[in-house]
């Protein structure tokens, strides 16, 4: 892949030297589906797929429709589908390709996700052979644009409570779809406002007076010839959104809409002609989770796309930060580029480190997904692990992307706010990734639930006396925590040479113990706090749970932090080049220590770090930033995005050219002897500048003059 | 003012009871310019001023032009201008009115700011009587739309280094304006792309071969008849931005453009006919800062507008959170509204508390500004205080607004992402507030510089021995900090009853000491670290400063946190109603403790809080959240925005109506006996739900089912 700039041809002279072999690292990062990713990146570099800023909503929607149709033909978007229908049954490969679409336009990624990842995929996973033959081909070819009609205005994350009903009528062998009240309108559905001619619709299945819970149905929506709604169906356009305006999100409602019995996607639940319900899964709860579990791929691909967008944002901001000079004071000799400012490094490099961590974690998620869905390792426990991993990573990476794009945008000042430089635009599009396909906060609660379940399982063989002892020990622990004491996990000597203790924090085992210990302790503490819930009323138990909701979510976050660190550490093993591995180990350390610094109060309160050692966390981070700064450009270049993907004028080299021109102008002026003399150099009294410190302090290089940035004003 | 919803008519029965008297609190919040704010709010409620989402950039720009012209006639926007020209010389009143414009459309607020706050105001403050007579009337009437041409592509915050030159030619008694290279193009200027017919332009003033530094010039840009650029002037449109697209930001460049000598705005520096330069301020540095100092009002009004937008966002999210029900499990009895979830409270209520703190801090800033600019208290020191205060508050409130809008948007899920509900739109518009009119990070460095200067001043009478003793004490301190010990500032007993220590944290004096002590210590530590800079080369000093840039910025943040807390505490004195004061005292405590919790590691490392007491910070915050939750609606209602300002369908009561309709449907169905029976209630084996904990744990009420929010998908 070509790069926009500065892809220095590093030759490793000394194998011990910290030098990034950009090309080899890029290969490692492309990973198991590297060839597919390369091919996808060539495709998305095609200007036909690039987002055009400033289109009207209608124009953007029309462009996305055309792009989806093109993808159906040229896009290799059918890999996950059955061989007999033209697919290759390569689940991971399909998602890898989808994740790359985000570089062209996040609306396109989501549109492809709706069409193939949700709509067609639901037919594949929730339907049976007859559905595959009858419905899949036109869904796969995008002849039928489909909506995924799950969410309702009144129920977003709580799918089990949706209001729409599908009541079986044995007289006609039909289901009757009904929207009982306004809150049960389907809402926020891509392809619903304009383009969809069919939907996979989720509704409460009722037959013989029994509600068997939420099931999926194939429901035609519009007459493809006229694009008018079919009888009994109505809807509304959700209109303009904060981003992703290439998607035609809309609302749908149904008034006694009849569909054939066989339009029930009946893999996990069926209704016979006479109305008898049957299911291979006896428990309604388990059945529900099994059906929804097939949809985990949405979260997997959002995780991957979010990591890719973080990479793009950092590519733009770090390239610009390496070229842009500020506060030069008119003297060519004192100019420094933005990235030489310590605060600029603080803003960008820890986010770069987390992006690397998120990359490796996503790789593991994608492989896990592939192995489960391809059947290689498809047990209940593995499905559960996959879902928990996705529920932990999707919130982490989507919030990280939003945060990183914002930091990048601010680090580029007014230039970062121009749509042409993409940061604000990507930020706007990624925003909703935090709440769709599982609200981040709700997903983290699912993770916490799983952590509690695992914890409870560990203790299941302990008798009542054992639990009592455990609780007593917990109380003793709490007393110890009052004044920080050394604990088993903290084996390092206190005090002494700051450099030595920083060196110890650098050790992977120390980081692992600190990160692991935190998760374990948080889970144990919450579990202990929730213990009375087993003996209390449902209301009291709910109240108790609510009182600890914040700690549950924090425990899940800590778990996700640990996963990222672990997967990064495992990923380091893939790096064969010693120079590259050395640099990436610093990046891993920066990630680990940033997480520890963020939670430093917790480590101090729990006696896991002494005050003295806690101070060294920040100073070691500072040292890592200094060490990594020269490698920043290599580290973003290794993401493998070329100018055709970055497409941001500020990261094109134009800034460097401007700065060089300005410096050359001043140099020539000085040499010509025609430069005006500065008044202050004429020997007049210099005076005191308001606010300038009088003693013992120099003015900061980056606040040399009063800062007034009147951009956009 | 009318309110959108829920403005309960609270009658204070028991004066000790914690009840918010919404109307009286609203009056307190409206403050010194309450009548003007009320009038401004009536104006901005006029649909002529409301932002229309989804306009093209050209349409939005045209709408803003029309609105600015309307404001010029009806908007009471000239209060700060001289009486003889139709103003009332009421600086604070003018800004108060401008701050209210943001509720209509942030583009309008900034457009008004460019026209009257920057362009016309620069003529007023940097020009002299002749300029006022000749140029002000048409700037004030908006007959001339003006650009404020300070920023250049190559220099944003570093105004002193701009490249544009204005060279005096005594032969023709003209200045020649020249753009020497591409990086010196003026950039990001509102009114430059399309609408501006003149500019106040900042350039290096050169006469007789001497560069006297940056001065302001009045430069005609376009022929008003044709709107073509005048000879020698060219430019570009900055195009679409991440927000604020009602502003026509653009670039300008100048090739030997000649303007008359008297177009120099000559209050602080003049050139005689023969080219002799003169200035009432001998020091070029001081002169520069004096000129820029007149522009502080931009930061003051951005601070106020940012606080107002935070209020609007919270009004929307808290109103919705009080109506929206989720995870009801289909049973009407167990439904809770979002705001009853502890995590939802954690997301919104601390931000509400900071918004109150920021409100009171802004009130003080605005009064300080007014007193300085009206001449009541206009000394050098007071100007310096004003500038430092503005430099501390503008970053704090603009970042807070961005963060708050994002939290509000996520708290409203997919509905929060729809443009009609304004949160995403306001978020996009406010984004650039963090980097224009002084980049936030650069402003905080100015604050830190001032803190260091004050600190140095305190120590100026100490002889060398004193400094040595001071340094020795600092070293002793550092040793003590290794293992947290009680210090003078920490007078509270350790351990013991958690409730009692939480009670102590509630005391204002404890909070004040903790917040004050942190600022003092941080400044002292940075000052000590920077001390060697006085004896080192300029390069070494700059490197040393760079090494401590992050701590400098953190010290400035801590200072801003303290200001907000102090001004909130002073503001409490204005609340006469005891019930309201009680609630607001909790809000103040929540703000103070949230700041302390955010910096808990610092307090632990520095021995200001023991581990035991540190734990109580979070538990006391939890108690405050529970206590404040019933008052949340009153607290946002007291901001005084009516439905005509909020204009968000989700905060209109529609959500409550939908939820009521759904509950009524289920109730009627149950009573009719026609409700379908749930399969799981038929006595079949319930089975184990994947991920459900087995022991000692209830499932969280808010994760009752697998969360899949397919909105926008």
Image (tube, coloured by chain):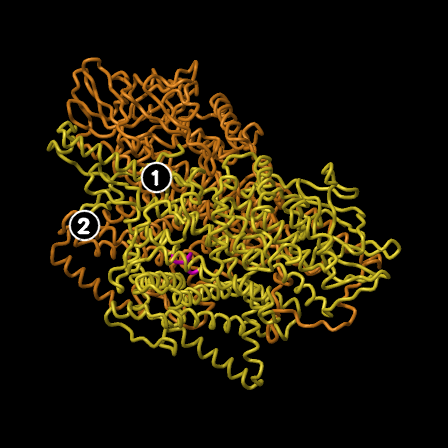
Chain colours: A yellow, B orange
The chain that hosts pointer 1 is B
Q: Which residue is mark 2?
A: B541
What kind of secondary structure does the magenta stretch mostly adopt?
helix
Q: Residue at x 44, y 37 (%)?
A: A420
Marks 2 and 1: CB-CB under 8 Å?
no
Residue A360, x across and y down, in percent: 44, 61
Membership of A355 in magenta stretch: yes
A518 displayed left or right of A544: left
Q: Specify whether disc 2 shares its chain with disc 1.
A: yes
Locate the C terminus of chain A by quadrant: top left
**SS at badge 2:** helix
Q: Which residue is mark 1?
A: B438
Which comes sooner in the sequence, label 2 or label 1?
Answer: 1
**SS at badge 1:** loop
The chain that hosts pointer 2 is B
Q: Residue at x 14, y 49 (%)?
A: B537
Residue at mark 2 to residue at mark 1: CA–CA distance: 24 Å
Give whichever of A702, A121 is nearer the camera: A121
Q: Give residue B360's mark.
A: none
Q: Which residues are magenta?
A: A353-357
Residue B503, can we see it? no
Q: Is residue B376 above or below residue A96?
A: above
Residue A514, x across and y down, in percent: 40, 70
């Amino acid at each position: 892949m070509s790069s926009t700039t500065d892809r220095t041809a590093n030759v490793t002279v000394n194998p011990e030297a910290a030098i990034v072999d950009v090309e080899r690292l890029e290969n490692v990062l492309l990973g198991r589906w590297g060839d597919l990713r390369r091919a996808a990146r060539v495709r998305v570099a095609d200007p036909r797929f690039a987002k055009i800023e400033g289109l009207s909503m209608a124009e953007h929607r029309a462009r996305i429709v055309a792009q989806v149709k093109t993808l159906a033909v040229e896009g290799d978007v059918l890999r996950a589908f059955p061989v007999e229908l033209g697919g290759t049954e390569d689940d991971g490969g399909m998602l890898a390709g989808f994740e790359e679409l985000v570089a062209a336009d996040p609306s396109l990624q989501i549109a492809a996700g709706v069409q193939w990842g949700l709509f067609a995929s639901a037919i594949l996973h929730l339907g049976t052979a007859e559905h595959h033959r009858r419905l899949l081909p036109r869904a796969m070819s995008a002849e039928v644009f489909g909506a995924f009609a799950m969410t309702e205005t009144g129920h977003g994350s709580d799918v089990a409570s949706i209001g729409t009903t599908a009541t079986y009528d044995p007289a006609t062998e039909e289901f009757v779809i009904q929207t009982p009240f306004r809150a049960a309108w389907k809402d926020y559905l891509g392809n619903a406002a304009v383009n969809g001619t069919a939907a996979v619709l989720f509704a409460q299945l009722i037959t013989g007076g029994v509600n068997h819970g939420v099931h999926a149905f194939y429901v035609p929506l519009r007459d493809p010839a006229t694009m008018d709604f079919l009888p009994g169906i109505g809807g509304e356009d959700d209109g303009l959104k904060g981003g992703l305006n290439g998607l035609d999100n809309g609302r749908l409602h149904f008034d006694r809409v009849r569909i054939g019995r066989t339009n029930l996607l009946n893999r996990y639940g069926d209704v016979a002609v006479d109305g008898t319900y049957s299911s291979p899964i006896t428990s309604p709860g388990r059945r529900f989770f099994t059906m929804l579990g097939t949809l985990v791929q949405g979260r997997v691909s959002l995780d991957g796309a979010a990591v890719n967008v973080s990479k793009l944002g950092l590519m733009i901001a770090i390239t610009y930060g390496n070229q842009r000079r500020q506060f030069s004071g008119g003297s060519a000799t004192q100019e420094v580029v933005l990235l030489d400012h310590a605060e600029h490094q603080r803003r960008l490099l820890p986010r770069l480190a987390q992006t690397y961590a998120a990359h490796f974690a996503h790789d593991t998620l994608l492989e896990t997904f592939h192995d489960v869905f391809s059947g290689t390792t498809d047990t209940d426990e593995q499905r559960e692990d996959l879902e928990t991993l996705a529920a932990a990573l999707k919130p982490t990476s989507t919030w990280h992307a939003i945060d990183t794009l914002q930091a990048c945008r601010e680090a580029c000042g007014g230039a970062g706010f121009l749509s042409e430089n993409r940061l604000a635009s990507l930020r706007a599009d990624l925003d909703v990734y935090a709440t769709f396909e599982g609200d981040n906060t709700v997903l983290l609660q699912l993770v916490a639930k799983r952590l509690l379940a695992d914890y409870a399982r560990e203790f299941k063989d302990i008798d009542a006396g054992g639990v009592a002892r455990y609780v007593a020990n917990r109380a003793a622990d709490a007393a110890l925590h009052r004044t920080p004491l050394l604990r088993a996990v903290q084996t390092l000597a206190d005090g002494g040479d700051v450099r030595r203790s920083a060196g110890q924090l650098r050790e992977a085992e120390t980081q692992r113990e600190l990160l692991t210990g935190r998760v374990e302790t948080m889970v144990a503490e919450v579990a202990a706090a929730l213990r009375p819930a087993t003996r209390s009323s449902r209301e009291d138990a709910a109240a108790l749970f609510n009182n600890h909701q914040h700690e549950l979510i924090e425990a899940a976050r800590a778990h996700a932090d640990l996963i990222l660190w672990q997967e990064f550490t495992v990923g380091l093993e893939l790096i064969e080049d010693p120079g590259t591995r050395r640099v990436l180990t610093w990046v891993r350390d920066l990630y680990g220590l940033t997480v520890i610094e963020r939670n430093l109060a917790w480590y101090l309160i729990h006696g896991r770090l002494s005050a003295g050692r806690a101070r060294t966390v920040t100073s070691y981070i500072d040292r890592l930033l200094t060490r990594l700064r020269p490698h920043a450009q290599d580290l973003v270049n290794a993401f493998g995005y070329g100018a055709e993907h970055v497409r941001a004028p500020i990261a094109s080299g134009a800034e460097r050219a401007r700065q060089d021109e300005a410096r050359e102008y001043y140099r020539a002026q000085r040499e010509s002897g025609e430069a005006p003399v500065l008044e202050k150099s004429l020997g007049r009294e210099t005076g005191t500048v308001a606010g300038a410190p009088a003693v013992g302090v120099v003015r900061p290089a980056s606040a040399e003059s009063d800062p007034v940035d009147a951009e956009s004003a």
